[in-house]
Every structure is written in C-alpha cells, then in structure tokens.
C-alpha cells in the first residue's frame, strides 16, 4: 500500500526508484522511512474504541463470535482477564472457561 503524502495528506502518490513522490505538491520522501513508520504504527494493538492494549489487560467482547471448527459461540459481554499480545492477524491470545483462543483486537473493548 502506498502511503499518503506526509506534507499535504493527499493520496495521489507513487513510487519512483527509492522515493515516493506526491503528484499534487511534488514532495519527495524515501521509501525506507515510510516502511519504518508503518512498523511503528503496527506495533500498538488497539481495541475497538482505539485504546492501546497491553499484556495483562482485561477486555470485554463487543460481539458474539463463532469459533471456527466448533459449535462454541463466545457471547457478547464476556470478560477476558489477563490477555497476551502476539503478532499476526489475531493479535490477542487469551484463556477463557471455554478454552484458549486467539482473537482480533477489533472485537474487544478494554475494561
């Protein structure tokens, strides 16, 4: 994904060699710097309300979630204590009465 221009915030940008170029304001910036900024932005895992999550936080499910390959449904309002953050598509590892699960942070709300 090509980032928006950091100077004018327009999304009409394109790569050219080692730089990104904004077609609207002609601003140029290195591709490597944009990749570093993306890594830092992904480092913070945020819940559905935009609160930053950390290891050991307690969260609540904001939506009923069907567990793939099972007849179990995790109900809305279920409180999950002592979460653990991991990399990947499902950022939160947790343990509940029904078992251990990997959940996406967008379905959680920090308590």
Image (cartoon, rainbow, N blue to C red):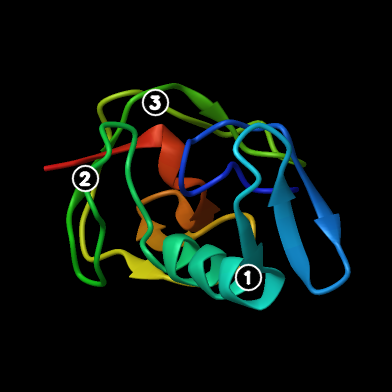
| Along the line of sight, the residue nearer the viewer: 47 or 98 | 47
What residue is shown at x 59% (from left), y 41% (from top)? Answer: 4
Residue 7 location (% of width, % of height): 46, 46
| Along the line of sight, the residue nearer the viewer: 12 or 55 | 12
| Residue neighbourhood size for the residue with mark 2, other residues' Cα within 10 Å, grouped as few (<14), some (14–19), many (≥20) | few
Q: Nearer the viewer, mark 1 or mark 2?
A: 1
Q: Which residue is mark 2?
A: 51
**CB contact under 8 Å: marks 1 and 3:** no
Distance CA(mark 1)–CA(mark 3): 38 Å
Tag 1 secondary structure: helix
Residue 29 location (% of width, % of height): 61, 64
Q: Which residue is mark 1?
A: 35
Residue 95 location (% of width, % of height): 38, 62
Q: Which residue is mark 3?
A: 75
Tag 2 secondary structure: loop
The quadrant of the rendering that contains the C terminus is top left
Tag 3 secondary structure: loop
Distance CA(mark 3)–CA(mark 2): 21 Å
Residue 64 location (% of width, % of height): 46, 22
Mark 3 vs 2, N-terminal side:
2
Numbered badge on residue 55: none
**CB contact under 8 Å: marks 1 and 2:** no
Which of the 4 image quadrants contains residue 87? Answer: bottom right
Residue at the extreme right of the image, as rendered: 17
4 in relation to 38, above or below: above
Mark 1 vs 2, N-terminal side:
1
| Residue neighbourhood size for the residue with mark 3, other residues' Cα within 10 Å, grouped as few (<14), some (14–19), many (≥20) | some
């Amino acid at each position: 994904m090509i980032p928006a221009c950091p100077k004018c915030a327009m999304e009409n940008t394109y790569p050219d060699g080692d730089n990104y170029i904004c077609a609207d304001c002609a601003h140029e910036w290195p591709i490597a710097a944009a990749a570093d900024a993306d890594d830092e932005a992904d480092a913070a895992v945020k819940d559905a309300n935009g609160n930053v999550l950390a290891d050991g936080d307690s969260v609540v499910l904001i939506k009923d979630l069907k567990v793939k390959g099972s007849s179990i449904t995790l109900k809305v309002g279920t409180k999950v204590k002592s979460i653990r953050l991991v990399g990947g598509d499902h950022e939160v590892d947790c343990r509940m009465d029904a078992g251990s699960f990997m959940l996406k942070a967008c379905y959680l709300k920090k308590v």
